[in-house]
Amino acid sequence: MEPNWDFIFHRRHPHYFRNLECWQRSAAAYAGGEAYLRQALIRHVSEVELEFAERLRRAYYFNYPRKLARLITQFVLSVEPTREGADPALVEDFSRSGLRAGEVMRQFSTLLNVFGGAAVEIEMPFFEGEVDCERRNREKLRPAAKVHSPLEIPDWGFGADGELDWIIFEEHVRVAPGPWKPAVELLRRKLYTRNECFVLEREAGTGIVRQRLHAVHRLGAVPAFYLTEPDGYGLNSGHYFEDVVRISDAILNNESESQMNIVKQMFGLLVISEGFARGARASGGSRSGGATEKFSHVLARSAAIWESPEERGISRYISPSGADTSRIREENDALKRELFDTVGMALVTPCREAQTAESKAWDYHQVKQFLACRADMLEQAELRCWKLMAKFDPSIRVPSVLYNREFAVADLKSSIESLLELREFSGGTAYRREVEKSALFLLEKIRKIDPLRRRAILEEIEREEKEADHA
């Protein structure tokens, strides 16, 4: 009996269903543009439709959510991770579409920042027949990593061992068979189990579901993993980026109101006499139904107005009073500081007094710990990618992956002087070895060292220690 493939397209994990709206809003905030302005701009209850339409056309968006998400990733990956023993071809093309390993992990990091979770799928192209080295390189018959946001992971399940038992990925694809045939829009879902893979497609217009592919991979494990932040969804809590988006929306609406506040004070209101209004109504006539049309007249600021001697001085422009724009700017500045503090990236205090050394050290320590935790997640994620690739192709060696965890701004001059003083102290072989390793670390701050050369230097330090012990 053939399985009910249509049921696969209706599966929704409770976590997915509960957070779908929040994820969609976070994705829209990250994307920005006019579509997000229409979604995030709030119409005031006393604002008429024409005023809101004008405010919408004038609005602009400072995309702080994208800035923060990318800023964290740029800090964490500011130093290229070391991948000792990695296949250079895989490092240069980790996705089989031209993305390097660092670029794939950059995508994964940004998705973690925006959604609080992300998944990596390890794909292997399907082929038949014998594979030699030439064919493997020509057809790129090797595993590849593909990053997915939680919006593309509708359902999944874990086994008794705590590992993924199955997972479903969803994507919208456009199939264009050729220039002479119309393209077809499809909703594709991939179902991975520990030993099989199913690719199902549903046509957008007809809703017909077809099984496009079924393959057996015999890995004994799902070729994918799904990670969430341990102190967010890992504690059955929400993700902090939802609060980031809300604060950003408050800044957007404050800026928009501030702009319109200035515009309204620049273009005053025209006050006209009753006689002029009566004359305009008379010249305008009435509607065919007999009802008098509501008076509405447009005058340029330089237009002439006829006044009778009795009404002289009545027609004039008045400038309506508005809120103090500087107060709105101050409120936005405070919101920006809170925005960065929400994600633990605030380094500038609002106080004008000089910070003490202890205060500065604590601020940098807070940011350093935040970034070090993210670096640890990325390191473990990349290592899992390499292990899954090795399951597909045993010839792929799992490298030693090490991400940078030193993010503090170091004073190299004082550090080197302190290190030279430490060399003067008498100590054992182990003590001298640690001093030499510290010197190597500082050398990398000045000049980037090739991973192979760095490995050779460390082996030389270890070899000298062993020779000293034997002597």
Image (cartoon, rainbow, N blue to C red):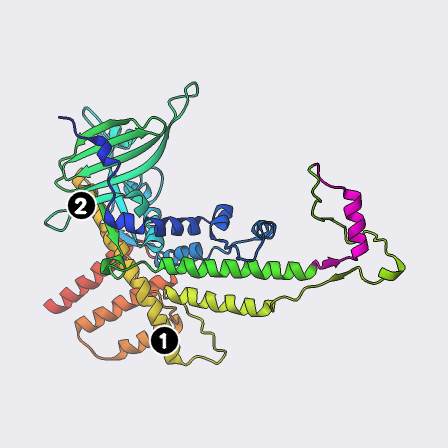
- Whether residue 402 can be seen here: no
Secondary structure type for disc 1: helix
| Residue stretch rendered in magenta on the structure | 267-288
Image quarter of the C terminus: bottom left
Secondary structure type for disc 2: strand
Q: Position of residue 4 (x, y in %)?
A: 19, 30
Residue nearer the viewer, 261 or 466:
261
Under mark 1, the amino acid is Ala
Image quarter of the N terminus: top left
Query: Is 107 placed left or right of 460 in the picture?
Result: right
What is the number of the mark on residue 361?
1
Tell me, yes or no, whether the highlighted magenta stretch contains residue 280: yes
Under mark 2, the amino acid is Gly
Residue nearer the viewer, 167 or 102:
167
Query: Is 265 placed left or right of 285 in the picture?
Result: left
Q: Position of residue 338 (x, y in %)?
A: 43, 67
Q: Quadrant of residue 390?
A: top left
Q: Position of residue 19 (x, y in %)?
A: 31, 51
Q: Is residue 258 above or below residue 209?
A: below
Q: Could you classify mark 1 by the number of other residues whose Cα lies within 10 Å: few (under 14), some (14-19), or many (20 or more)?
A: few
Q: Is residue 287 above or below residue 450?
A: above
Q: Residue at x 50, y 56 (%)?
A: 62
Tell me, yes or no, whether the highlighted magenta stretch contains residue 360: no
Work out whether mark 2 precedes mark 1 in sequence or the reverse, and give the earlier one: 2
Q: Are marks 2 and 1 in contact (CB under 8 Å)?
A: no
Q: Which residue is mark 2?
A: 157
Q: Position of residue 138 (x, y in %)?
A: 29, 29
Q: Quadrant of residue 412?
A: bottom left
